[in-house]
Amino acid sequence: MLDLDHPRSRHVLEASRVEDLIRMLLLAWREDEAAASSARTEILQTLLPQLEALNAAHFGASKKIYRTLDALGRAVQGADAGKAWRAFAALDGPGDNFGTWAI
């Protein structure tokens, strides 16, 4: 469970907000291929840069988090929504990520 008194908690909550936006876009893409282009653009140009900035500013520029975000970015650039979803799953559980799964 997230300790709301921890100084990093608000940044974990912000990462969770951005991850939720990515989740919604990927779900829309999985359900309708017509959503792929706008989902890719939003994720690659807006949302991943926001997570990278959070990592740089508040998570010690974690190389592990950067690798997870890079893998997601590479998967989103492809045409396979399922592959992008599987790459996103690395953000959504224990591992090299922001810890939002603990909320």
Image (spheres, rainbow, N blue to C red):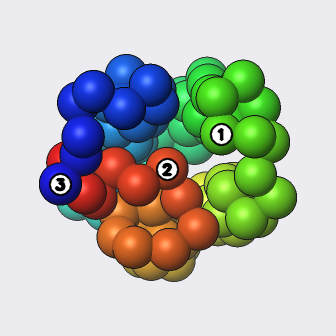
Q: Nearer the viewer, residue 13 or 45?
A: 13
The reply to whether callout 2 and callout 3 are in contact (CB within 8 Å) is no
- Relative to 56, 51 lies left or right: left
Q: Residue at x 28, y 58 (%)?
A: 101
Q: Residue at x 34, y 38 (%)?
A: 16
How much space separates mark 1 and mark 2, taking CA atoms?
Answer: 8 Å
Q: Earlier in the sequence, mark 2 or mark 3?
A: 3
**Residue 91 visible to an observer of this rendering:** yes
How much space separates mark 3 and mark 1, taking CA atoms?
Answer: 18 Å
Residue 98: mark in rendering: 2
- Relative to 9, 40 lies left or right: right
Q: Which residue is mark 1?
A: 59
Helix, strand or loop at mark 3: loop
Q: Position of residue 83 (x, y in %)?
A: 51, 77
Q: Which residue is mark 3?
A: 1
Is 3 placed above or below 76 here? Answer: above
Quarter of the rendering containing residue 57: top right
Helix, strand or loop at mark 2: loop
Callout 1 amino acid:
Phe
The reply to whether callout 1 and callout 2 are in contact (CB within 8 Å) is yes
Callout 2 amino acid:
Phe
Q: Nearer the viewer, mark 2 or mark 3?
A: 3
Near mark 3 (Cα within 10 A), the count class, few <14, some 14-19 or many ≥20, is few
Q: Earlier in the sequence, mark 3 or mark 1?
A: 3
Near mark 1 (Cα within 10 A), the count class, few <14, some 14-19 or many ≥20, is some
